[in-house]
Image (spheres, grey):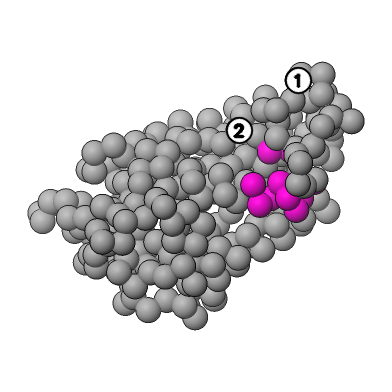
Amino acid sequence: MARTTAKGSGILLADLTWQEAENVLGPETIIVIPIGAEAKEHGPHLKLNNDWILAEYFKREVLKSAAVVVAPTVNYHYYPAFVEYPGSTTLRMETARDLMVDICRSLARYGPKKFYGLNTGVSTIKPLELTAKILAAEGIKFRYTNVLELVGQIEAVVKEEEGGTHADEIETSMMLSIAPSTVDMSKAVKDYHPSPEGGLTRDLQGEGAYSVSGIYGDATLATPQKGEVVVRAILEGILKEIEDLSQ
């Protein structure tokens, strides 16, 4: 049997030799693929690698609790809403879709047919849905996190801002809970200008929600206590979805 992580039942694929990988990759193996942008704006108070930090956190927690094999974190995907803010990157939808298809196909050839995209984004959901459809036609199960669904009820309890979904009260609270050293609350602001158009824009005449800061919501209301509640709800949801995938 290949070595496992020190504190849990999960296995990091990157830590194995190919011979060890051969021993743990079978038809019933669940492969978890974390997805978190490492270059995507999150306002003036959070780092560009905010989503990557989230993905790494949830990855570590999953390793402690689930008998899965965790693949390397995917740090580029589909984030078109933020390209006006320097440092932000996005793949085309088709590229993001096919990236995940190719990763799963590569690993499926060794036996696994069950994959879970540990997804920390929102715009990523559409290409992940397309990935799942392609793989399903090949007999490969691919499920992915929909963060908005997992935090729906909990968010309604803790949320005080009038609205927002990005670098806002909730996301900032999560980071205050899991990685407080990455948050500069002295730069947190309220920047919420709803628009029927998608995406954020720094241009008053641009398409999308106007945001000078890159925040969509009120980050000043964030607290680590709120973040702890939301993070726990997301983690519980992720673990439940992985368990369902094993059935």
Three-letter amino acid code of the residue under disc 2: Pro
The quarter of the picture where residue 185 lies is bottom left
Q: Quadrant of residue 110?
A: top right
129 part of magenta stretch: no
Q: Earlier in the sequence, mark 2 or mark 1?
A: 1
x and y, in percent, of residue 76 in the image:
45, 35
Q: Quadrant of residue 56?
A: top right
111 sits to left or right of 80 = right
| Labels 2 and 1 touching (C-beta < 8 A) | no
- What's the CA distance linking mark 2 and mark 1? 14 Å
Residue 30 sits above or below residue 245 on the image: above
Q: Which residue is mark 2?
A: 72
Can the viewer see residue 123 in this picture?
A: no
Residue depicted at x 47% and y 78%: 158
Residue 67 counted in the magenta span? yes
* x then y, percent, for residue 215: 28, 58
Name the residue: 41% across, 42% down.
Answer: 49
Q: Over which residues does the magenta segment extend?
A: 60-70
Residue 17: mark in rendering: 1
